[in-house]
Every structure is written in structure tokens, then in C-alpha cells.
Amino acid sequence: MTEATTSPAKQQLRVESLHSPEGMKACVELQQRVWGYDPIDTVPDQIFIVAAKTGGHVLVAYDKDQPIGFALAFAAARPGQDYLHSHMVAVLEEYQNRGVGRLLKLAQREDALARGFDLIEWTFDPLQLKNARFNINRLGATIRQYLPNLYGRTSSRLHAGLPTDRLVAQWWVRSPRVATILNNGEAHKPTHSSNGRTAAISIPANIRDICRDDPSAAEKIQSSLREQFTSHFARGLAVVGFDLNSQHGSYLLERYEN
């Protein structure tokens, strides 16, 4: 698999699917550079090899010959549904906000379509607001599940010592919704109403500053989010849109069938 795009700096980027053990070591180094993991929290290259050999994939983005990001996915199954679980997508800081993450996700979708998968799932931190907007509005993922403290507390500076609560993104790669969003660039946003069929969950736009400066306050916000998401999902609502402004990031929910 090879994809190419042009960054604002006119650099040619590509994505390649890795299968040989030699290339996997770059993914270990990228984890430490992107997230600052201690060695104990870093996924070793052997796991990347297993993923590539057992129905998942390892996709690496390059600028010329320099690896600048990767996507790691495992083959997964539940009763009646085979799918890909996208465990990690990492992009070097100097290449973030330049289309590399989108390039990797589109390469994941291409691989899924070619191999007959309808669904790619991944988890993400609900406090990462730009990531939420990308997943929901730019890719067309929908969300119906909240997982409290999925990985335990880790050494990553991004986690700020908080429980690793996660939302589960479902990306139905063959759906009209996803095709429309990828073509048009933006998701439908439901209008909030008081009839119980829609809802909004808001987070301060400066949540990352709060996580850094006042972890206790951040954990209280996180606990409130956990309660709100759990309650709305239990009522059959799904996240289908996201708003972000200077004050708040808001998850927008409605009753939705994939």
C-alpha cells in the first residue's frame, strides 16, 4: 500500500504497510518521541510484528526516508462482527496538524475495504478535544461506549496522571455517512433540543491547561463526563457531532442507526 499527499511545505509524504521485523523498531522510537512513555509503557516491536502477521496491520508514514508516524491495528472479532481495532496512531509533533494523521487513517480505511472489513474501532481520550473533532467531524466516527480507566494510570505526559478513560470510536468505513463526510469534509451536527432525543456534553476548551495546572479539578471534570456519557449511552443516544470554540468543546448526541 502506498499513499501520497502534499503538505503546505510541498513535501511528498507516503504511507507504507510494513511486514518485515526491521521496520518495526522505528515504531517503538516514535512512541517515545510522541508520548514520552517510559520503557515499561512502550509497546515493543514484537507486538507490531504479531499484529502484521495475524490479520492486523502496521502502516508507517514517511517524509522521504524518515518515519514520521504510524498506525497499528489488530484483527478483532465479536459475535457476528469481524473488524479492525486501531490500537495506536502516532505522529511526530513537528508533523502534527499537517494532514499526516488523516493520511494514516485513510490508509487504514483503504486496507479495511480491500480486505472486506466494514468496521474499524479505536479508543481515544475524551479530554483531547482536537482529536475528538477530527475523529467525529472529519472522519465520521460515531460513539456509543465509554470505558473508565481502560489502561490504568500511565507514565505518559498526555495523561497528566489521570485515569485513562476512553471513548470507543466506531468507523463504519463503507457507510454513506463516512463517504459523505470524507467527500464533503464535515459531519452533520444535530441541533440540541429538550425532547430527550438529543444532548450535548461540554468540556472547557482549556482542559489541557487544567490537566497540567490543576489535576484535581481535571479529575472532577472527568468524573462528571463519565456520568454524563454513561447516562446518555444507556438511553440509546450516540455521539455524531462535535463543536469546538474558544470556550468549550461539545460532544453532540442523538438517536442514530449506523
Image (cartoon, rainbow, N blue to C red):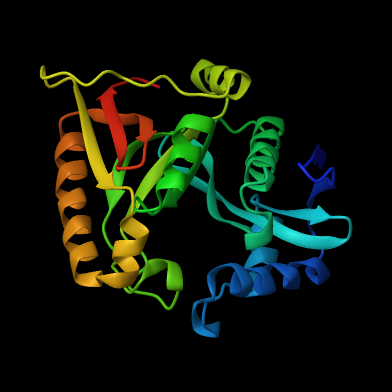
Q: Left or right: where does residue 57 sit relative to residue 80?
A: right
- Using the rendered image of the protein, determine whether residue 22 is visible from the camera's viewpoint: yes
Question: Which residue is farthest bottom?
Answer: 39
Where residue 150 appears, as percent x and y from the top left, is: 33, 62
Q: Nearer the viewer, residue 170 or 206?
A: 206
Q: Residue at x 66, y 73 (%)?
A: 28
Where residue 19 appears, as percent x and y from the top left, is: 79, 58
Q: Is residue 147 above or below residue 241?
A: below
Q: Left or right: where does residue 165 sit relative to residue 23?
A: left
Q: Left or right: where does residue 113 sit relative to residue 215?
A: right
Count of numbered labels shown in the rendering: 0
Quadrant of residue 46 within the rendered picture: bottom right
Quadrant of residue 27 within the rendered picture: bottom right
Where residue 56 appears, as percent x and y from the top left, is: 64, 51
Q: Left or right: where does residue 66 sit relative to residue 230?
A: right
Q: Residue at x 67, y 46 (%)?
A: 98
Q: Residue at x 31, y 21 (%)?
A: 256
Image quarter hosting the C terminus: top left
Q: Nearer the viewer, residue 237 or 201?
A: 201
- Using the rendered image of the protein, determine whether residue 164 is visible from the camera's viewpoint: no
Q: Is residue 236 above or below residue 23?
A: above
Question: Which residue is farthest right?
Answer: 64
